[in-house]
Image: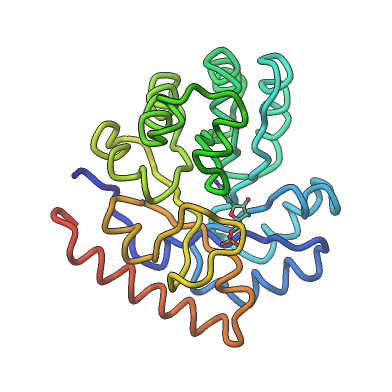
Amino acid sequence: MKLIKLPAEERIIFPLDVSSSEEATLWVERLNPFIGVFKIGLELFISEGPQIIEKIRNKTNKKIFLDLKLNDIPNTVSKAVRVISNMGVDWVSVHLLAGSLALRKALELAYNNLKIIGITILTSLDRADLLELGFNAELAKDLKELVLRLAFLAYQTGCEGIVCSAKEVEKVKENFPELITIVPGIRLSEERRDDQLRTATPYEAILLGADYLVIGRPIKEASFPEKVCEEIIVQIKRALEEREDD
Ligand code: C5P
């Protein structure tokens, strides 16, 4: 398996899932040594507006991922991406279900080295949800197949990477080794899942081929978040050592 080379510490993406810039900057200051990418999601972006990006940028030189999960018609998505290109972030997310034209146009209008990350199927969804949404039984039965189709779309259109669950990452990496794989739904033990349905430990996810891990609540809600980060890094290192060509 061809995997990107990256030290363990740079593989953790911490979602700044808070609503104020004060809280967000405190987390950045506190976790900066352990984290490779800070993710700004809808809650923080909507409550604080685009100025939040500069505030975070002033506190860290790590990557910033603007995770807005854009999903709209090609004209709207691509023009949003053009505006975002000027905001000083490294990655922005677009739903692959927005379709190939939206992705192509978004890539055309992206500049300042802004990279696009494609969202496949949310890790909070399972087979029953997909059936309810009207996906045919064959596709819904095997999420891997569906995610693989979306990964192909990401690869074909020139996205930098995709977000998928640990359950699909091995197949994605096998087929599209150039795509960066970002895996959320990470839990340190099997008992805690919150609203995530397709979960894995950091060790399992990295072993399966994840390049980056999104880890929020297991760090944020811990009594000693720094200790949890250290534990995650140990797990990542152990998995990297076991991966064939790392
Ligand atoms: O680790 P935790 O469950 O708290 O992580 C939640 C974060 O993961 C949220 O910021 C959410 O947007 C993100 N996420 C994602 N893609 C998914 C599922 C969750 O980026 N498919």
Which residue does the image show at 57% across and 80% down from the upper left? Answer: 225
Q: Is residue 221 above or below residue 116?
A: below
Q: From the top left corner, tell me how far across and down residue 22 is, in percent.
A: 81, 69
Which residue does the image show at 33% across and 72% down from the upper left? Answer: 235
Q: Which colour scheme is used?
A: rainbow
Quarter residue 155 falls in = top left
Q: How many labels sit on residues? A: 0
Quarter residue 38 falls in = bottom right
Q: From the top left corner, tell me how far across and down residue 99 is, in percent.
A: 56, 18
Q: Is residue 127 above or below residue 213?
A: above
Q: Let me know if residue 92 appears in the view.
A: yes
Which residue does the image show at 44% across and 72% down from the upper left? Answer: 188
Is 84 on the left or on the right of 136, as rendered? right
Viewer-side residue, 12 vs 216: 216
Is 142 on the left or on the right of 126, as rendered? left
In the rendered image, which quarter contains the C terminus? Answer: bottom left
Which residue does the image show at 24% across and 63% down from the upper left? Answer: 240
> Residue pushed farthest left?
244
In the rendered image, which quarter contains the N terminus? Answer: top left
Viewer-side residue, 210 vs 178: 210
Q: Is residue 123 above or below residue 149?
A: below
Q: From the top left corner, tell me how far across and down residue 73 is, in percent.
A: 69, 16
Q: From the top left corner, tell me how far across and down residue 158 is, in percent.
A: 43, 24
Q: Let me know if residue 117 appears in the view.
A: no
